[in-house]
Amino acid sequence: MTDRIYFDNASTTPLLPEVIEVMHSVMREDFGNPSSIHSYGRRARKIIEDARKSIAGLFNASIGEIFFTSCATEANNTILKNAVRHLGVKRIISSPTEHHCVLHTLDYIQENDDATVDFVHVDREGNVDLDQLEKLLEDGPKTMVSLMMANNEIGTMIDIGQVSALAKGHGALFHTDAVQAIGKYPLDVSKHDIDYFSASAHKFHGPKGVGFFYMNQDHVLPPFIHGGGQERNMRAGTENIIGIAGMSKALEIAYMEMESRKNHISRLREKFKKGLIAINPEIRFNGNQIDNYLHHVLSVSFPPSEKVELLMFNLDIHGICASSGSACTSGIEQTSHVLEAIGVPMDYVSIRFSFSPLNTLEEVEKVLRRISEILLR
Ligand code: PLP
């Protein structure tokens, strides 16, 4: 593990030792079923409710507005499908650069439910066309706007305040897939008018298989998964206590270290970017690079050449892990729908490098040296 370099933190992140410790402790001591009324059950229940309280506090939400799920995919399915089925939403406005768990859910809704989907255009940096969004919102049936807070492939972010105000100002519901931004940027539901957002623990050094969503108390949805009365009847199934405890710890640390992590990762990103330009000034950086972007994501497109064709393969041979597209689809999808939507020439070879606070400047230098060797030798 030590001589490998992991620059694929937008697909998933390593668990922090403190998170592992909390999870170990729950595994050892707190196996009780939180629905049991005896002491084991009560201890398990307390762990869940403490986590909920801690997470809700970070977003200025109330504890009744946070619901634990198995992942963000489940959270997004719950919100989008149930808004159509149970809140009378007849149209969803979204963008072509959303994650597949949103796009494929929207496909399903169009085919099977009584609602239509409109997509707003994105420009060459992946910024959403807000004028078009406003025009679309001016008339039409009951609408939900679903736009991701930050794009997982190119890092472009929306202005959450502006978009939520636009949606809510026109009487629409507003949902944001906030998976890539949570723990990296503050999100305050008392400041911004957000009805629903989704999150996933494994993107912020928590465990896989656990996530949560925020649901504003004014727009309550019925459950998506039916069964027992867990999560206040909102999400049936015995809770993943180990995961929830780990997620809460990881998010707590992410908030404590938010500023220092951002500064550290921004330095890595800038150094890496400069180094790449020095190797080949024709290299393109995808997504917004000026103001609204994720500091941990750098999507790079290399001009076509024989050496570039084998770049990912060669990096992997040397223990350098990055992503050729969105992680959840790599190996399956040939061309990225996001890069296609922003007009990246398809003969360019695109690689997403994504950083974490565990990465170092030395690693950046090593990867740059390796890329230079591969491309210039
Ligand atoms: N949304 C975005 C923006 C993502 O990057 C991902 C994971 O890559 C997901 C949703 C899905 O998250 P999960 O793995 O928790 O289902």
Image (spheres, helix red, strand yellow):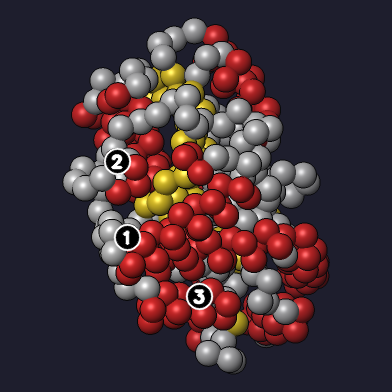
Q: CB of mark 1 within 8 Å of CB of mark 3?
A: no
- Residue for point 27% across, 25% down: 85
Q: Give the vertical position of 331 relative to 108 (above or below).
A: below
- Say which residue appears at 62% left-offset and 21% top-offset: 166
Side (left or right) of 261 relative to 137:
right
Q: How many residues crowd mark 3 within 10 Å: few (<14), some (14–19), many (20+)? A: some
Q: Which residue is drawn at 75% across and 84% down?
A: 362
Question: From the viewer's perspective, is residue 221 above or below residue 226?
Answer: above
Q: Amino acid under label 3?
A: Val
Residue 250 percent location from the top left of the image: 57, 66
Disc 3 within 8 angstroms of ligand 1 (CB): no
The residues bearing labels 1 and 3 have C-alpha atoms spaced at a distance of 17 Å
Give how far across and how far down residue 361 sits, in percent.
Answer: 76, 79
Within-10-Å neighbours for mark 1: few <14, some 14–19, many 20+: many
CA gap, disc 2 and disc 3: 27 Å
Q: Name the residue under label 3.
A: 22
Q: Read off the residue under disc 1.
A: 34
Q: Where is residue 370 in the image (x, y as percent from the top left)?
A: 66, 83
Q: Identify which residue, 242 or 271, lies in the foreground.
A: 242
Question: Label 2: which residue?
Answer: 233
Q: Is residue 304 at least partly visible in the picture?
A: no
